[in-house]
Amino acid sequence: MTQKNSNEIGWSFNNSYVRLPELFYTRQNPTPVKSPKLRIVNEQLGKALGLNVQLLKSDDITNVFAGNEIPNGATPLAQAYAGHQFGHFTMLGDGRAILLGEQITPSDKRFDIQLKGSGRTPYSRGGDGRATLGPMLREYIISEAMHALGIPTTRSLAVVTTGESVQRETELPGAILTRVAASHLRVGTYQYVANWGTNEELQVLADYALNRHFPELETDENPYLSLLKGVIKRQAKLIAKWQLVGFIHGVMNTDNMTISGETIDYGPCAFMDEYDPATVFSSIDRQGRYAYSNQPGIGLWNLARFAETLLPLLHEDQDRAIKLAEDSLSNFKELYHSSWLTGMRGKLGIFNEEEQDEPLVEDLLRLMEKYRADYTNTFRALTFDNLENADLFASPEFKEWQERWQRRLDRQKESKARAHELMRNNNPALIPRNHRVEEAIEAAVDQGDYSVMDELLDALAKPYAHTPGQDKYTTPPPPSAQPYRTYCGT
């Protein structure tokens, strides 16, 4: 099962993960499918990866995206990992995903190429290893929108349909997503090795992460402490970026937190419409563990689990190791807060720092919650001084806040024009709103019409452009008696 013309297509694999101890993975080929059809392909990403754009829609590469052919140089495997799922620890692993290998780009960067929905593995735990079309299209849309927003994320290269049905509540069309990531190392990967491996294997894994994601830290006096601090810093910045655009991941289990600092595993995720810190989209999160306002705290909780796995490497004396870990974790709140507040200053056109900036931000958010204001559109309206057609803007409380904000802008040396330019660069014109995403998926799945999705992706590709063509995607959904809910969609 080897693909022809791999060099012509542009595959350039150099697979470091397979050279790690066999505890970390199982060699596993994808399960071939009946009749693969390419439904969408990311030509821009393909070009960046070094693939031949002219051949991205060829049968050869479609067969690779489907798992029917293995490119030369690939070494397919399923990764093992564990994780706390809603607080409960369990053994996991790639139950429906196969890592084909690591593509080396023309700029000498390394990316995992993974097939999601490519069949059963030893970690499937009774599952069929398959995925359905709707959720794979959803991950494609959301992950590419996140990338365009400037948020670190795994990306989507292609979606193929398999020609086979997948049984869920009903029969649904099967599909496979080709996912691209800086790596698929997770907090749960370290939890797995810490629980079922040796300290020597744990050190190998830590050294691997340092070399792949933090090479500048390898020569530090205590590189494993530096690794912990590096991951904490990246996650603090990542979650701040989520909060700034109103993104809710939905399932922040430890197996869904990457060492690289990328957003991963787009299951029951969505963006807020009305601002409400208690917003939950996941149908399975009945207690609100992963609500919008809880994301920073859960991020810290997950990082504490990561720190626990590294204790044997931090110091030979356990008490000293615990102290080093606790001191590192204590920096998370300030790192997160600083990134978030800096981002909020940008959203309000503020260049410098004053003590009253945070109360100014918090008061606006409080008013947005009170008046059920749309999160994205409120900041967009402030950016363009278009303060009409919203209960928030008509309220005396807002007018008092607006006066305070204008006085704040007057106190900085930068002009109002520059302030609004800063706001345009920090406040997206649009987000992948839930009703628009569902509209695109429904057209594709039910009618075979991908034009709706193509148009949505085009609009989402430049969220800070603020062009007239984006206007139709800025409208909130019509009022509904039922809150919007998403599903893991396996």
Image (spheres, grey):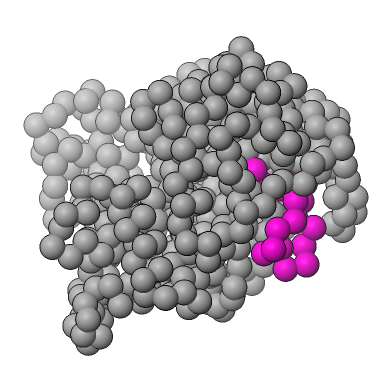
- In terms of depth relative to the viewer, which is nearer, 200 or 42? 200
Residue toward you, 452 or 312: 312
Above or below residue 349? Residue 290 is below
x then y, percent, for residue 368:
44, 52
In the rendered structure, the answer to whether residue 130 lies left or right of residue 140 reads right
Q: Pick whichever, 7 or 386, lies toward us.
A: 7
Q: Quadrant of residue 41?
A: top right
**Which segment did they paint magenta?**
114-135
- Image coordinates for residue 485, horizontal then vertical, percent: 68, 56
Looking at the rendered image, the quarter that the N terminus falls into is top right
Q: Is residue 451 left or right of residue 162?
A: left
Rendering coords of residue 115 (x, y %): 64, 43
Q: Main secondary structure of the magenta part?
A: loop
Residue at (68% x, 28% y) in the render: 3
- Looking at the image, is 107 positioned above or below residue 138? above
* Residue 86 in view of the camera: no
Tell me: 102 left or right of 354: right
Query: Which residue is pictured at 87% across the width and 58% down the height?
Result: 169
208 inside magenta stretch: no
Q: Is residue 120 magenta?
A: yes
- Residue 409 in sight here: yes
Q: Residue at x 25, y 85 (%)?
A: 318
Horizontal and vertical percent position of residue 287: 59, 74
Q: Residue at x 38, y 33 (%)?
A: 109
Q: In this orientation, which residue lies closer to the viewer: 107 or 41?
A: 107
- Residue 227 sits above or below residue 43 on the image: below
Question: In the image, is 195 to the left or to the right of 230?
Answer: right
How many numbered marks are there?
A: 0
Q: Residue furthest top?
A: 54
Quadrant containing the C terminus is bottom right
